[in-house]
Amino acid sequence: MAEQAIPGWKKWLEGSGDQVIFLKGFFRNVFRGGFEWSEFIRQCYEIGYKSFMLVGITSFIMGLVLALQLRPTLVNFGALSMLPKSLAVSIVREIGPIITAMICAGKIGSGIGAELGSMKVTEQIDAMEVSGANPVQYLVVTRILATTFMVPILTLLGDVLGLLGGFLAINITSSVSALLYFNKCLASIDFTDFLPAFIKTVFFGFVIGFVGCYKGYNSNRGTESVGLAANSAVVTASLWIFVIDAIVVQISSLLFYR
Amino acid sequence: MPLWCRSAVYFFIANMKEAEESPEKKSKPSETVIHIKGLKKSFGSNDVLKNINLDVKRGENVVILGKSGTGKSVTVQCIVGMLVPDGGEVTVFGDDVAALKERQLKELRMKIGFLFQGGALYDSMTVRENLEFPLTRVLKLKDQKEIDQQVKEVLENVGLSDAIDKMPSDLSGGMRKRVGLARTLVVKPEIMLYDEPTTGLDPITSREISELILQMQKKYKTTSIIITHDMECAGITADRVVIMSDGEYIAEGSFEELKKSKDELVRSFFKPTL
């Protein structure tokens, strides 16, 4: 007798339940003794340091393009002096965190998904488990904490480089001193711009690590599943980033920008 | 000394001796360390294991033979608690594996070595780090000198001292299996489970691995279950051979006994393949 097809909603519920169990396993292992410090530092290096160039270049170009695009509109309104402020607020509040998170979802999320997926396929995770070691502690906890820790740092660096890109764009068409530009930028940003943006990058980092680990750790046995795990990690993490962004912006609007 | 007093002393000494001997008795050669009774396991509508019964004595090398997909690997995965049986029981060292809690299962797994088909080496680590992993994470050893000494010793035993700082990607198939074997032996397990240890190897390397399994079994005094469809490996390593077909055991005996079997299915395993 052919097996009955499982309805989509039931699969979705099962998947959600699995994710909750996985999340519970992560938190249980975070507070259990024997934290893998050396692996955590290695992951911070792999995730953070090795992504710095990509995040930096992208943020710099985004800042440059944003300034070039904003300039004609502001000139039309006779508000060219508002350019540093517009740049600073848009980069710090939204563009910096989102661009960094999307790059990290693509680079780090897919990397974690593919790495753990291939470890699953080649029975390395099973070998760890069967030997009595704790693969969740070694592979999952370190990666999720490393992304949670490094994505906010990468965002800060991305913000600075984005503003530098904006400075270059302004100097292509006119002449502004670096001191004046950065003074204007910093004067236009306050705590309520920076804090919600920083908090959401912590969540972005967590989601990128969590989704990558979950997809990789629970991939199937074929080589095809490694690609699927990587792909699915990027798509799901990107979606979650936008959902979190919408929620955080809504909450921070209610709290700070009314 | 009064008689009652002397009797009490003798009784005390005898009890002490019995108490001291009890751990020895536990490890006597005839002790059953793995007991499988009525084991059943299905995946969806596919009944992989229908009724498996097996007892493995301490120090014994049992080879499970069978065609691909007959449930050999599923059997050993149930032994080590990677899969939960649908029916029957699997007892290792007297503990029902399915009923063990997480910590108890971890303790049991520390006594069992599992050699995976491809070696399952951690490919982001060197051979040294692969061998250090179970020592530091499972046995929780801290002394680097002791760790180095154990790593060197076990690598010498499998004849791969030179490969200590190589990455798994730099090793051949046979070397990977040797390192995989070294990694499982480094924690000195009491039971070794081999999942197709010679699959994918050339006949010469395959023979070397089979002989190594036998040597290591003698050196480390392990109890072993070897899953294979390599008849040469079975001939070299087996004290007892069990043949599986369609989720059930169809024959059991020594290699030589089964070789002379009149059962058509059993005989088909021993037919020369050219």
Image (spheres, rainbow, N blue to C red):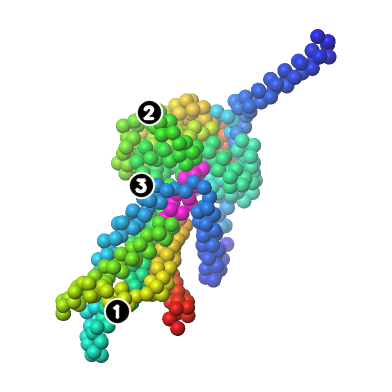
Judging from the image, mark 2 belongs to the subunit labelled B
Q: Mark 3 or mark 1, which is nearer to you?
A: 1
Tell me what residue is drawn at x 60 percent, y 27 percent: B27
Magenta extent: A128-143
User: Split into 4 quadrants, where in the image is the N terminus of chain A?
Assistant: bottom right
User: Split into 4 quadrants, where in the image is the C terminus of chain A?
Assistant: bottom left
- Estimate the spatial distance between the alpha carbons at disc 2 and disc 1, rounded to whole Å: 68 Å
Q: Is residue A155 magenta?
A: no
Tell me what residue is drawn at x 38 percent, y 30 percent: B152
Q: Mark 2 or mark 1, which is nearer to you?
A: 1
The amino acid type, in three-letter code, at marker 3 is Ser
Tell me what residue is drawn at x 52 percent, y 30 percent: B222
Indicate whether A150 appears above or below A86: above
In this image, B230 relative to B263: left or right? left
The residue under label 2 is B156
Which sits in the foreground, B25 or A27? Answer: A27
In this image, A79 relative to B6: left or right? left
- Estimate the spatial distance between the alpha carbons at disc 3 and disc 1, rounded to whole Å: 46 Å
State the SS at label 1.
helix
State the SS at label 2.
helix
Residue B209: x and y in percent read 40, 32
Mark identifier at residue B124: 3
Residue A123: x and y in percent read 44, 48
